[in-house]
């Protein structure tokens, strides 16, 4: 049999091993009652904006610009400039959203197609309001178009990054629209209901 000192050393080793087993058992038991934390999937990365997305963002900014400018327009300006503005800046949004709709799934795709149709209809009604010289109808249709664009950008923003919208350039006037090529830019004035430039009164 091992000497007395050897037996005490063996007993100490056995106690130490038992203590370690107890500690490990308690640790495992504690871990077993901890709530399970599911693994969080990384957020899906958004695609950079393409040309159609940029058209939607631009149309939204132009709608805001037009709403601010409508009170400053003269009635004789509406048939020419309002119809041109709608055609150049608002109408392209409909086709742009329709092109994006195929990349949206399920209900989002269906909703985007309905919004694309609404954008086209409202842009046409803005042009018609210009021909009819109706500021109130033009304002109402532009507000509706802006709201539809907000909904459209909400859908598009689920798959594309949306660039920050630039602040409005301010009220739209014929002079600012055509710059140095406007009658005003040449020191003249535009004849009412015409594109003809005439001298300022007193000249």
Image: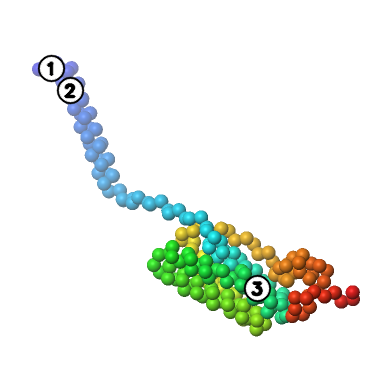
Q: Residues within 10 Å of mark 1 (few under 14, many from 20)?
A: few
Upstream in the sequence, badge 2 or badge 3?
A: 2
User: Of discs 2 and 3, which sits in the foreground?
Assistant: 3
Q: Residue at x 54, y 60 (%)?
A: 51
User: Is 197 or 34 nearer to us in this picture?
Assistant: 197
Where is residue 92? Give x, y as percent: 56, 69
Upstream in the sequence, badge 3 or badge 1?
A: 1
Decide if residue 197 is on the left or right side of residue 90: right
Task: Write down the residue under mark 3.
Answer: 84
User: Of discs 3 and 1, which sits in the foreground?
Assistant: 3
SS for tag 3? helix
> Which residue is at the far top?
3
Give residue 116's mark: none
User: Is 42 or 153 nearer to us in this picture?
Assistant: 153
Task: Write down the residue under mark 2.
Answer: 10
Q: Note whether residue 93 is visible.
A: yes
User: Is 25 or 96 nearer to us in this picture?
Assistant: 96
Q: Residue at x 35, y 50 (%)?
A: 39
> Which residue is at the far front?
196
Decide if residue 175 is on the left or right side of residue 104: right
Task: Write down the residue under mark 1.
Answer: 2
Where is residue 24? Give x, y as percent: 25, 37
- In this rendering, the answer to whether 193 lies above or below 18 is below
**Quadrant where the C terminus is found in the figure:** bottom right
Callout 3 touching callout 1 (CB < 8 Å): no
SS for tag 2? helix
SS for tag 1? loop
> Which residue is at the far bottom?
132
**Quadrant where the N terminus is found in the figure:** top left
């Amino acid at each position: 049999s091992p000497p007395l000192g050897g037996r005490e050393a063996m007993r100490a080793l056995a106690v130490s091993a038992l203590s370690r087993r107890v500690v490990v058992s308690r640790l495992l038991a504690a871990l077993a009652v901890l709530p399970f934390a599911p693994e969080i999937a990384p957020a899906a990365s958004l695609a950079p904006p393409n040309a159609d997305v940029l058209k939607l963002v631009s149309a939204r900014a132009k709608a805001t610009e037009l709403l601010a400018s409508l009170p400053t327009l003269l009635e004789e300006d509406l048939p020419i400039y309002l119809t041109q503005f709608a055609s150049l800046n608002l109408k392209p949004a409909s086709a742009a959203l329709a092109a994006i709709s195929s990349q949206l799934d399920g209900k989002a795709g269906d909703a985007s197609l309905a919004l694309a149709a609404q954008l086209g209809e409202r842009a046409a009604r803005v042009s018609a309001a210009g021909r009819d010289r109706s500021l109130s109808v033009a304002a109402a249709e532009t507000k509706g178009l802006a709201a539809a664009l907000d909904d459209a950008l909400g859908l598009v923003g689920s798959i594309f990054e949306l660039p920050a919208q630039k602040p409005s350039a301010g009220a739209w006037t014929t002079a600012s629209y055509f710059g140095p090529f406007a009658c005003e830019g040449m020191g003249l004035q535009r004849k009412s209901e015409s594109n003809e430039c005439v001298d300022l009164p007193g000249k």
